[in-house]
Image: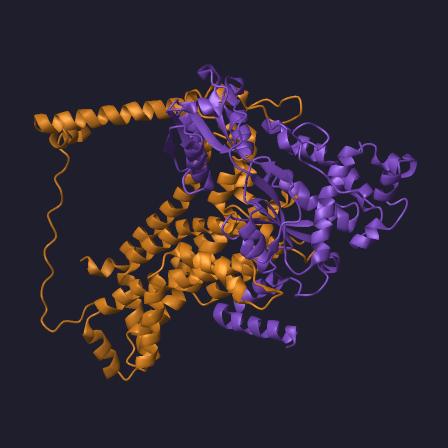
Chain colours: A orange, B purple
Amino acid sequence: MSVTVNHTPSPALPPPSRVMAGGPLGWVRANLLNGPINAAVTLLLAYLVVRYAISFIDWAFIHAIWEVPNDRFGRPDTALCRDNKGIGACWAVIGEKHRFILFGTYPYEEHWRPAIVCVLFIALYIVSAMRRFWRKELVLVWVATLTIIGILMWGGVFGLSYVPQERWGGLPITLILATFGLAFAFPLAILVALGRRSRLPAIKALCVLYVELIRGVPLISLLFMASVMFPLFLPEGMNIDKLLRAQVAIILFAGAYLAEVVRAGLQALPKGQYEAADALGLSYWQKTGFIILPQALRLVIPPLVNTFIGFFKDTSLVLIIGIFDLLTAAKTSIIEPQWQGFAVEVYVTVGLIYFIFCFAMSKYSAGLEAELNRHRVR
Amino acid sequence: MDTTKRRFSVRRLLAGVMGAGLIAAATPALAQAPAAGTNLIETIRNRGQLICGVSTGLAGFSAPDSQGRWTGFDVDYCRAVAVAIFGTDQNRVRFVATTAQARFTALQSGEVDMLARNTTWTLSRDTSLGLDFPATSFYDGQGFMVKRSLGVTSARQLDGATVCVQPGTTTEQNLTDWARANRVTIRPVVIERQEDNTAAYNAGRCDAYTTDASGLAAVRSTLQNPNDHIILPEIISKEPLGPLVRHGDQRFADLVRWTHFALIAAEELNLTSANVEAAATGDQRPEVARMLGRSGDLGQMLGVDNRWVVNLIKVMGNYGEVFNRNLTPLGLQRGPNALWTTAGGLQYAPPFR
């Protein structure tokens, strides 16, 4: 709804594409096999794709080993898998280790608790993603869910046994770091972005300093600072949980990056929007809340989601401070001597989990973008 | 300054930063490490748990198993100290996984009570870090592994050989130092990750693979045919590994040291997890009687129960049992970690009296 004085007609949409002549075969002939060079490239690529697809399927399914027998000590005997190395995958490693990869060192008989936590997180994402739930009550749902998640993870009440933080691990850690990180970083980012465009020099300087300082160092050194340097500054006898320190570092880091994305949206708005809001006599917060932010954030959905996806994966950097997130748990699961050497199977599985989350995020953002920007496409 | 007040103000500060949502999270997160000058054994007893820093994962020394339980040689040392303090329960330990970079800070800042984390005892670490090595639990050293078919029996025959090695560690430096000192030309093939090193060695890209002997044994046990590979007898560096404690509480350091010595002495006196209970009442040897608390007050001098060695050996077994449980499956020989009574053995315990 850009406000312009001279109405310029929007450019005409291109005519509807031609109805496919000759069906899919005709499309292939027209687009992939037109001319000798194109035909050669198509055939070469098709050959490579088919060849690698076949050898992957061969490795992953046809020659794969799904189970291994136990030796006389009751431990899994992986000799079968070792002989099959390079020929077929050894999915037995996932069968044996999947609970460790997903939940880390959490007490084995209590694994249902982090399992419910993962389900709750995913349910929370789905509910928050639906536009019909975008009301004030959603905040209450978040607070309630996160409280339940905290109770389930820590326990110590309602007959649940207490589980200290250093025993948490796997997927819940990744989800906690990513969810809390982005949930706290996003409001922080909006404030910082507004602050950077403030007319008050002190606020502006503070925000610029924060963004530039945090963006100037890599996340890994910030995590390092939080885990190695920070405890030395505290009075002796005083410790702040390792996960909390990492979480604060991630929030601060994500906040700086997101602030720059939001600022881009603020700057992309035409000045007329600000002036019109002022002319209506709106206060600063009314102007920002009702006029500026709804338009600015809409503009920056793609880079926002880009940053979200990046941070979801960046949470795996906590491995350098000894927290067992999903990736670290996966790496640790193949340290036991009999399972060493089956890294590919484990990495493929973990990669799939990361992919599911990231792909869902990117698909959702594409849909959201199309829906919110519908008025722009006439 | 009143510590409760200080702690409270920090918590308020956090509240400002994190918002109300995380405050609930932060409350149980404020661990209660002891202030300087207090009795750490007493603090641990009041807390009900020993907090022990271990490696994030090293086969045979410390790694979680499929069910997430910590197992390994270093892990057993944590459990041993806990048993010494608490009596029979080996599960009164909280394991904190520490990376190589963060391990010393974790101990210095009081996040953990002790470290049992394959750390080499060196002069600079013993002095400038404000930490103490009470004992050497495992004598390690850098060695070489070659294919048996090569026909090499000594590292000195490796002249002109290519050797796979990890970069950035003392391993690489030890290799070049040793080659220069022995006038052997060695072509190092530097590969970042251990797994890639193993693969390169296995594929024949290098004639030999060098790392700590314990690591070599672990790698060898995972190769397709372990008997096709031999570990050469030369050990080219000294890597005494042991637990660490903070400066400032010698009583706790004493307890960790004598827990190690009790494991060694028990093996020397043929006390095992199976027979120690009977020996506590039946064995007439004077040293056994003193050690197991039938005569004298040795336990009380350390600040624990007089029957602490009985509990310790019953739950954990002696040094040999701990070694066999964790390191023998990797194919590790006792070597220098044998008792001083066998040839080449270095493990020695001062008398219990």
B305 and A124: which one is in front?
Answer: B305
- Quick one: which residue is furthest to the bottom in this view? A281
Residue at 49 percent across and 61 percent down: it is: A229
Q: Is residue A199 left or right of residue A29?
A: right
B209 sits left or right of B82 in the view: left
How far from the left and from the top, in percent, is residue B57?
54, 41
Percent from the top left, x then y, of residue B28? 62, 62
Residue A90 is left or right of residue B29, and the answer is left
Would you identify the image quadrant in which residue A189 lies?
bottom left
Q: Residue B295: x percent and y percent?
A: 90, 46
Residue A320 lies, with reference to residue B47, above or below; the image says: above
| Image quarter in which the C terminus of chain A is found | bottom left
Q: Would residue A66 be seen by someone viewing this image from the given angle?
A: no
Image position, residue B239 (x, y; %): 56, 40
Name the foreground residue: B291 vs A118.
B291
Left or right of A37? Residue B36 is right
Visible residue check, residue A132: yes
Placement of A216 over or under B159, stated as above or below: below
Task: Tell me what residue is drawn at x 50 percent, y 54 percent.
Answer: A176
Q: Residue at x 32, y 26 (%)?
A: A53
